[in-house]
Amino acid sequence: MRTLSSELGSLADHLSSEPRIYADANIPAGLVAFMRGRLHWDVLFVIEHDDLRRAPDAEHFRLARQLRRTLVTLDRDYLDDRRFPPADCAGVLVVSGPDERLLARLLSRLDRAFFRPHGRSLSRRVPPGIADSSGLPLEGRKLHVHPDWMEDRASR
């Protein structure tokens, strides 16, 4: 059965070519500013919404899927597949790092690896009504990354 959220979610994919992110309450505001300003991600930051800032993790997980946004968090609880099944998500990025500077570098690598893998320009806009091919690159998957993430892959 089609729902209002499923219908609106696919429409949202057509309206913006930028990665659509759901940043939960434990993401630092400076990192959200980096995602918006430098990476040009479309970020819904729960701290900016009084009705969401104290919502439980399960509600954030559900809303991120409903709104067709990749959930970005520092909270490792989302790695529990029993509580948060990968098949039920629009994508979850659990990031780990000692400070905002390294987290920002990590997000830049994630941007290149998943959201703009073909070097798509940060300023490229998709005209209304034209589907963008990026969609939700992590839909149905979770990824736990740390500052050495790409270096680990390169050294193998």
Image: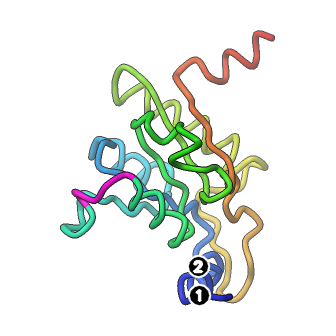
Q: Which residue, as the protein is rendered here, is positioned at the far left?
A: 50
Question: Number of numbered discs present?
Answer: 2
Q: Is residue 61 left or right of residue 133?
A: left
Quadrant housing residue 9: bottom right
Element assignment for label 1 = loop
Asked where in the image residue 15 lies, by quadrant, the reply is bottom right
Is 137 in front, or is 3?
3
Q: Position of residue 115 (x, y in %)?
A: 66, 51
In this view, the residue in front, 41 or 76, is 76
Q: Position of residue 118 (x, y in %)?
A: 78, 49
The residue nearer to you, when weighing 62 against 94, is 62
- Which color scheme did the rendering employ for the protein? rainbow
Label 2 packing within 10 angstroms: few (<14), some (14-19), many (20+): some
On whether residue 108 falls in the magenta region, the answer is: no
The residue under label 1 is which amino acid type? Thr
Residue 138 as seen in the image, left or right of residue 96: right
Q: Which residue is mark 1?
A: 3
User: Can you identify the residue that label 2 sits on?
Assistant: 9
What residue is rendered at 63% in x and 75% in y? 13
x, y percent for residue 129: 70, 89
Q: Could you tell me residue 8's position as x and y percent?
A: 56, 85
The magenta stretch is: 53-57
Q: Residue at x 61, y 45 (%)?
A: 111
Determine the residue located farthest toward the front in the rendered image.
Answer: 82
Q: Residue at x 57, y 32 (%)?
A: 144
Say which element carries label 2.
helix
Quadrant where the N terminus is found in the figure: bottom right
Q: Amino acid at mark 2?
A: Gly
Residues at marks 1 and 2, CA–CA distance in whole angstroms: 10 Å
